Amino acid sequence: MPLDRKIAYIDLTTGDIQTKPIPLDVRKKFLGGRGLDAYLLYNHTEKGCDPIGPKNTLMISGGILTATCASATARTHVMAKSPLTGLLGSANMGGFFAPEMAWAGFHHLVIKGKAKHPVYIYIHNGEIQIRDARDIWGKSVTDSQWAIRDDLGDQEVKCCVCGPAGENLVRFANVMTGIKNSGGRSGMGCVMGSKNLKGVATRGTMDIKIARPTEALEYNKRFIDQIVSAKVNQTQGALGTPFIWGATNSWGGIRTRNFQYNQCEYADDIEPERLDEICTETMGPYHMAGCFGCQVHCRAQYKIPSGPYAGKYDEGPEYTSQGAFGGETDTPRAVTVLTGNHLVDKFGMDNLETGSLISWAMELYELGIITSKETDGLDLRFGNDDAVIDMIERICYRKGWLGDALADGGIAASEKIGKNSFDYLIQVKGMSNLHSDERATPGLALNIATGSRGSDHLRSRPAIDLYHLPEEVLRKIYSNPVPYDGPLSSEHTEYIGKPWQVFWQENCYMGVDCLGICKYHTTFLGATLPNFEDWSKVLYYNTGLEMTPEEIWDVAVRCNMIERLFNLREGLTRDDLKKGDMLNHRYFDEPCRRGAIDVVGRKIDKKKFIQMIDEFYEHKGLDNMSLLT
Amino acid sequence: MESMGKVLVINYEKCTGCRLCELVCAVMHDGISNPTRSRIKVMKWESEGLYVPMSCQQCQDAPCMNVCPVKAISRDEELGRLVIDYDVCIGCRSCCRSCVAVCPFGAMSFNSIDKKVFKCDLCDGDPQCVRFCEVDAIEYVDADDVSLLKKKDAAERISIAGKEAAALAAQV
């Protein structure tokens, strides 16, 4: 049964390993994955602990449905106190790791302490070992995984590892699995590196009995038909996430030159169709790959067509790499984007944070706030492709003054650089914003301001707000499974009703993260995709656990509240620009300069924005200082 | 006219490596999620992005059937498949003359939990791997049409190559 998968408590300082079952009442309260991780983090991490000290706790988990016959249950969740923000650190990735760990008998790992020398953890059919990784330390993300397989003499082993960036304590290093699946944002790879933990390897051949196999199989088929019939998923399956960048750039929703413009000009070379051509030329007509059990297959395969890394195989690039190494730095060249993507994959470093910080440094360089003295002679003007590629490596290996400063994250770097550098840093809670520009979309602006792990598009984004769905359709979506009869607006430039949408999406995304399902299989980009109602059935057919859609909603609300309480405990205060639910002043002061007629000239109205936050707190059950009422 | 049964045709180029076929195979047969119970297995070369699903070919001159010391494997002409009679099968698997050892495709496996050999049975004519594979990397087609489909693919490639050559010639 999925419900008999266990938790392992691993102390790397002492080598002590304990395994425990997950009690049914804990399951009913938190399900698994991110939600149960949040509960474990809150209880196993001391207030104010050093994120890169041995007292920080690293959680690695699968959802309650991982490896079952629900669709796309590939997701692995990673959680700890973030070394980038000092608040919640949380990352979610696809691939094949969590299902393998479930077949090996475990859903959750709670890793404490610090090993005396580099080690990796090996989990095999109920048994856990801590093994020497001294010979593997220093290797790239993929080479580390192949070396672990060789060490174990088993090519079927699945690993999640940190790369050189995690070892070098880059504050936004990733935990990664496979070629490119990244537990990115908030520096979970840095926490791994700080524990002298190279990674976790797993191999499992233990049965997971499906409660009602016939129903589970048939429901999965229905799910799949629904998922692949959504136009958004068909496009995603053909072009990958770059199609989103293409669409939003043509409309004016992409930030360029840090935050100076909201549309990248002359971007033909990084349009999704162009990237797809490169994938076809280098990998053939069938170049889309999928995570475990997923039919969306949004991961493109490519080889770098030219330049110093020509011929190197990688996957993606996701639209985040397009934004990070093409748009923000104003280097819209395919080779730069594909090379940048390859380097961050190899180093195990967050693409989004890296590109964002480089573009911030570029603006500071052009303004004279930093000079060639800080850049060690690098010409860091916008549009310099070589400088972008060079800076990625400098950050990973902390080379030069600026490389070392940026490796500590934006806020720490702004304190080192001084002057008014912080004013130009586009971040929330110390984490850089996505490459998107939310000045024309107050709902999306509210989402990035209030996301639990800092500025983020995967924690509460009401992305379907951009589709201008009729109000009755919106109401059908947003008044289930709990009733809502407040205002809703089909207009993306409006402020009314958005707090509820963000609150609803926050719970929807927490729901999938607890179940272990990918967000492309729920109400994220596709308005018609499954949510609470379907989850209740799929949970029952696969695990036998009977929970109503409302009860799953309650779990999501509870888990989001734990994340908020963790952040409050670690210093979140409402209007704090560095640790609160607040946006950079440019959102309120500088209007969009480019884009479509409904975008150009737009900026966020601060008064209305603050009202949205008040309303959002009210939905969450918080007072106007973000405290629990 | 009824054909002589259908066969599984695998086009590995189309495979996205998601392994949903392995999952549904195990759930359909055993009610259990466990890829080691799957009759189909996606072999991967991850560093090259190459995924190749492997399953029983239902061979005409089948080594597994020929070698079986107790004659537990026979041909089911109706569905064009090889079937194992578990009342007869003795579960041998390590000797070089066992079905597991002689299959050139590694398609006969041994399930160490249930202590049984097992292979693809075409789900009695409704193969779930085919039903769930949205990219058609696995198809279930009339045996007579297999080479026809291959001919069509090859002809398409030749025709595209011809057009590209003509376009290049026109540019010169």
Image: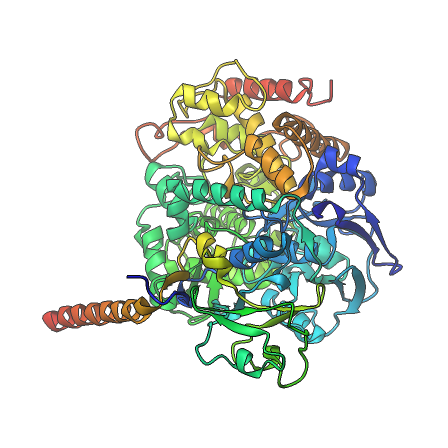
Relative height, residue A73 to residue A575 (above, below): below
Q: Position of residue A546 (x, y in %)?
A: 68, 33
Task: Report if residue A419 is visible in the image.
Answer: no
Q: Position of residue A513 (x, y in %)?
A: 62, 41
Q: Residue furthest bottom?
A: B96
- Residue at screen point 67% across, 69% down: A138
Which quadrant holds residue A436? top left
Q: Along the horizontal axis of the image, is A615 left or right of B144?
A: right
Which quadrant holds residue A82? top right
Relative height, residue A627 to residue A263 (above, below): above
Q: Position of residue A374 (x, y in %)?
A: 57, 55
- Residue at screen point 40% across, 37% down: A253
The image's colouring method is rainbow
In the foreground, A258 or A96: A96
- Residue at screen point 42% across, 39% down: A260
In the foreground, B81 or A197: B81
Which quarter shows the C terminus of chain A?
Answer: top right
Relative height, residue A26 to residue A319 (above, below): above
Tally of marks: 0
Q: Position of residue A459 (x, y in %)?
A: 58, 36
Q: Along the horizontal axis of the image, is A334 left or right of A1?
A: left
Task: Report if residue A264 is visible in the image.
Answer: yes
Relative height, residue A554 to residue A296 (above, below): above
